[in-house]
Image: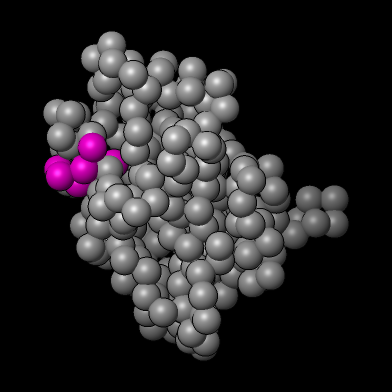
Amino acid sequence: MITVDGKAVYTELVELVAATHTALLLVDMQRDFIDPDGLFGELGVDLTMYERSRPRLATLLAEARRAGALVIHVQNTALPDRMSDSPAQIRFNLRMHENARREGPPLRYTVPGTIGYEFVDEFQPIAGELVVNKYRSSAFWGTNMEMLLRSNGVETVVIGGCTTEGCVESTARDAMFNDHYVVIASDCVASDDPAQHDASMLLMRHRFDMATAAEITEVWGPSSAREVRPVAEENSE
């Protein structure tokens, strides 16, 4: 820790990710995005990077639960009939998924009630964990994320999930803009486009702290555990 103009600033990983003030944000670990039977898998999108990152993120989740860090599952949501999509958002969709849709219409994915909307098995929320539904790339835009973090005394967010250059980076930037420390779980984020993943990681390394799942869980050793949170009556939205 250092002091800058009278303000204490965390600088060491052990300070940044202490379980007492840290939340693990699991971004969009849903079937449509990362499962071979989901929309992108069926379109032939390369999911190889997710195959590597999923078990590491699952381990990080298990360690967060053991240590008592707040766990928040971020669930991308697209309302039926494009009721949550503005014309600008549709244009964004067209450009973002230009290769996957093969000159077809804008893609439809993560619609509530479809199997693709659901979290994959290893990232199913358990009792007491929060779910934040988002309609844009950032988990903060138009959601109650900041209220939940503030209400639970969260100073730092550890972010894992997909995609690196999309919803992960957007969420990381907005977390910082809301005055949270940001730690990217560097081996727990992935993309279906390795080049975009690498570009995003290059940018984020110059803005946020980076740590592997192993480095974070080392901080979340047995001595870091705090009182288990009471079971929530319902999800956040």
Please determine whether, in this image, residue 159 is positioned above or below residue 150: above
Q: Does the magenta stretch include residue 34?
A: yes
Question: Which residue is farthest top?
Answer: 103
Which image quarter holds the N terminus?
Answer: bottom right
Question: Which residue is farthest front?
Answer: 81
Residue 12 percent across, percent down from the top left: 55, 58
Residue closest to the eye, 209 or 180: 180
Q: How many labels does the image show?
A: 0
Please determine whether, in this image, residue 4 is positioned above or below residue 194: below
The region drawn magenta spans: 33-39
Q: Which colour scheme is used?
A: one colour
Residue 178 percent across, percent down from the top left: 69, 48
Q: In this view, does 82 lie to the left or right of 151?
A: left
Q: Is residue 149 left or right of residue 94?
A: right
Which residue corresponds to the image point at 23% horizontal and 63% vertical from the top-left? Answer: 121
Instruction: Kindly tell me whether residue 33 is visible in this rendering.
Output: yes
Q: Quadrant of residue 98?
A: top left
Residue 102 percent across, percent down from the top left: 24, 14
Question: Which residue is farthest right?
Answer: 6
Which residue corresponds to the image point at 68% horizontal and 61% vertical from the top-left? Answer: 147
Which residue corresponds to the image point at 44% horizontal and 35% vertical from the top-left? Answer: 81
Please determine whether, in this image, residue 230 is positioned above or below residue 163: below
Residue 164 percent across, percent down from the top left: 39, 37
Which image quarter holds the C terminus?
Answer: bottom right
Please determine whether, in this image, residue 10 is positioned above or below residue 86: below
Q: Is residue 193 magenta?
A: no
Instruction: Kindly tell me whether residue 155 is visible in this rendering.
Output: no
Residue closest to the eye, 133 or 9: 133
Which residue corresponds to the image point at 52% horizontal and 42% vertical from the top-left? Answer: 135
